[in-house]
Image (cartoon, helix red, strand yellow):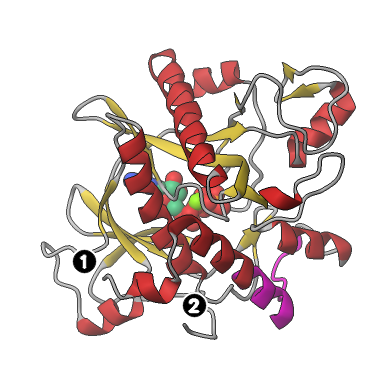
Amino acid sequence: MTSSAVTSIELTSLHRLASGKVRDLYEVDGETLLFVTTDRISAYDVIMKNGIPDKGPLLTFLSVHWFKVLSDKIPGLKTHFISTALPSSSPISAEDAATIRGRSMHVRKLKVFPIEAIVRGYVTGSAWKEYKAKGTVHGIKLAAGLRECDAIPGGPIYTPSTKAPLGQHDENIHPDEAAKLVGDKYAKKIEDLALAVFRAGQEYAAERGIIIADTKFEFALDEKTDEVVLVDEVLTSDSSRMWPKDKYEPGRDQESFDKQFLRNWLTREGLKGKDGVEVPEDIAKATSDKYREVFELLTGRTLEEAMKTI
Ligand code: ATP
Ligand code: MG
């Protein structure tokens, strides 16, 4: 599609409510938002200076695809997704519409729970580090003798973290701690939904040659109905570790379709956690290619084909 990455978006016809590391949230009306995904990329909680070409549209269409697949697979699942069409209730200029084409989702504005609902099917990343040191993952004791990237015996586990403000680091916590943050009334529901959505996603991805090793979901409360709703992005290469099934081999780091490539480069160069890092063009291009490859495997179409549908 495009060759340059879009890291900053200024719309003139909508009011920006907030900006995250990757997304900008615009007010549509009192009850809904326009959820706009830029090409910004963060790793180890820091935003890189330049972006990843086409990442915003790739993440947007992949999330939209998952919202549909998951709603079919899990009866009764509530999500924040309304439409990829621009809201008619709030007029958007032709120029703004062109700027965010393929990057926006109209969603319900909800009260996001203050935790990251992480689910892990495999021992990797920070979970592997903790397991190697203590035999636990987020304080949960696992069987002895697991190798790096082994599947967690007994199936995926819910391993939440805190949701740190911009510039700070999320902290891995035990599910009991998460229950204190969200309240007992919703804790079990969030855990059950996170596990159900993860299993459904894993099953769908496995049929397409992909292992979803772990992911981070966000859930919110619909205060009108008291329902727990799946929000944010879902099962994307930003929020998940995804590995090609045919190359999977426990006992080592895996080849992956996600940010791991960028993380490894940062670590190699001694730039992990540093501000304002400029990602070289070849690393940005390789990351974009990985996001694109897994997008095509999971959705069965190219980004260019997806763009034609809106
Ligand atoms: P990261 O994804 O790396 O943790 P971030 O948390 O800064 O970064 P972004 O993805 O850039 O997040 O921005 C999305 C923001 O929108 C998050 O703060 C998320 O909690 C919030 N959000 C997601 N869905 C909704 C919703 N339906 N209503 C209100 N806020 C939402
Ligand atoms: Mg986010």
| 113 left or right, relative to 293 | left
Q: Position of residue 57 (x, y in %)?
A: 43, 68
Task: Confirm whether the magenta stretch covers residue 276.
Answer: yes
What is the C-alpha distance between the residues marked 2 and 1?
20 Å
Asked if 310 appears above or below 31 in the picture, the reply is: below
Q: Amino acid at mark 2?
A: Val
Residue at point 72%, 31% (across, down):
151
Residue at point 80%, 59% (across, down):
264
| 241 left or right, relative to 53 | right
When asked about the image quadrant of residue 149, the answer is top right
Q: Which residue is mark 1?
A: 86
Q: Position of residue 283 (x, y in %)?
A: 72, 74
Q: Which residue is mark 2?
A: 6
| 205 left or right, relative to 86 | right
For the C terminus, the quadrant is bottom left
Residue at point 37%, 73% (across, down):
305
Asked if 135 appears above or below 247 in the picture, the reply is: above
Q: Amino acid at mark 1?
A: Leu
Q: Position of residue 39 (x, y in %)?
A: 52, 70
User: In this picture, which residue range is highlighted in magenta?
Assistant: 274-288
